[in-house]
Amino acid sequence: MKLITKDLSPTVKILLSIAILMTSISFASLFITFFKDYPLLYQAIGTLFMFGLTSWVCIKLFIKDFKINFTKPKHKSLIIWAIILPIAIIPLNDFLTFEGSNAVSEKLLQSNSFPQFLIVSLVLAVLPAVTEELFFRGVIQNLFKELTKNALFAIILTSLLFSLMHFELYAFLPRFLLSLCLGLLLIASNNLWIPILCHFINNLCVCIFYYLNNLNIIPSADSTIYSQNPILIISSGIILILFFIHIILLALSQKSN
């Protein structure tokens, strides 16, 4: 299949990738109606079709030497950042979130037992982290980089698309910020598992909040109640700035080598 598309321009590849995604969404919407009485199964199949299937097709068509996205990371510190960063920036993300809620997601997040929590985490943390990163970082960011010849522009454009395609404008800014971090992690590590890990931790935090709330261990599943303290917001911003500085220093060291 790559032989058929090797002469296509990056712009055409990007447009075709989005068209393939839209086709997968349309196909999934027809198929998953049979599972509407099983919301978690409905969500899982939808995610696999929309981003999993789309990513597989696009990689086969457009991405040469895709294995290069899974080379061994040179800097183990990026693994630590992938774990710490999505937790540390919760106060800042909540500060940037406008009022709004997703009733569907909140319904899916309800879990009253540990086995149910594991299933919810699989569907809402593991599957989206893997499939969305394959599509947005593995496919779209690579194609934008091919188009712009600039890694930073590619990350920004991918982040705009990533945030818009979640169709929740009240959370546009925090998703855009998260996507910037995910894109930088990929560029710095050249390993797609690093942003996948970061994305997973980000989603897992939400699952944990709801699980602890359902067990009456914490008063609310809404993390914004823990982010009203200006000190937490400022600390969150400082940690984010330190992450950006670390990425810049890594980039400079790589250039000097």
Image (tube, grey):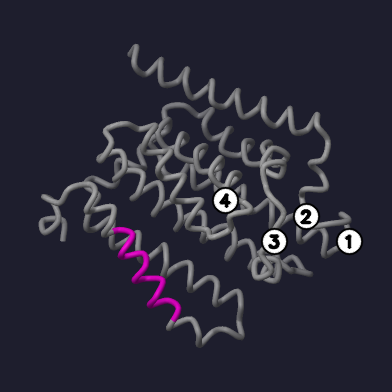
Give the spatial CA distance, label 3 vs label 2: 10 Å
Residue at horizontal 61%, vertical 39%? 83
Which region shows up in magenta?
17-29
Q: Residue at x 47, y 17 (%)?
A: 249
Relative to 116, say whether 238 is above or below: above
Q: CA distance from mark 4 to mark 3?
A: 20 Å
* Element type at mark 3: loop
Alpha carbon distance from label 1 to label 3: 21 Å
Mark 4 neighbour class, 10 Å CA radius: few under 14, some 14 to 19, many 20 or more = many
Asked if the residue at tag 1 contacts the one at tag 2, i.e. Cβ–Cβ closer than 8 Å, the answer is no
**Residue 113 image-quadrant placement:** bottom right
Residue 216 has which mark? 1
Q: Nearer the viewer, mark 2 or mark 1?
A: 2
Mark closer to the chain start, 4 or 3 = 3
Q: Which residue is mark 3?
A: 101
**Residue that label 4 marks:** 200
Q: Position of residue 238 (x, y in %)?
A: 67, 25
Q: Residue at x 45, y 20 (%)?
A: 250
Mark 2 or 4, nearer chain start: 4
Local packing at callout 3 (Cα closer than 10 Å; few below 14, some 14-19, many 20+) is few
> Which label lies toward us, 2 or 4?
2
User: For mark 2, what is the residue?
Assistant: 222
> Which callout, 1 or 3, points at the residue further toward the start of the chain?
3
Q: Is residue 24 in the magenta section?
A: yes
Q: Looking at the image, is mark 1 or mark 3 nearer the viewer?
A: 3
Q: Nearer the viewer, residue 218 or 161?
A: 161
Q: Secondary structure at mark 4?
A: helix
Mark 4 against mark 3, which lies toward the viewer? Answer: 3
SS label for mark 1: loop
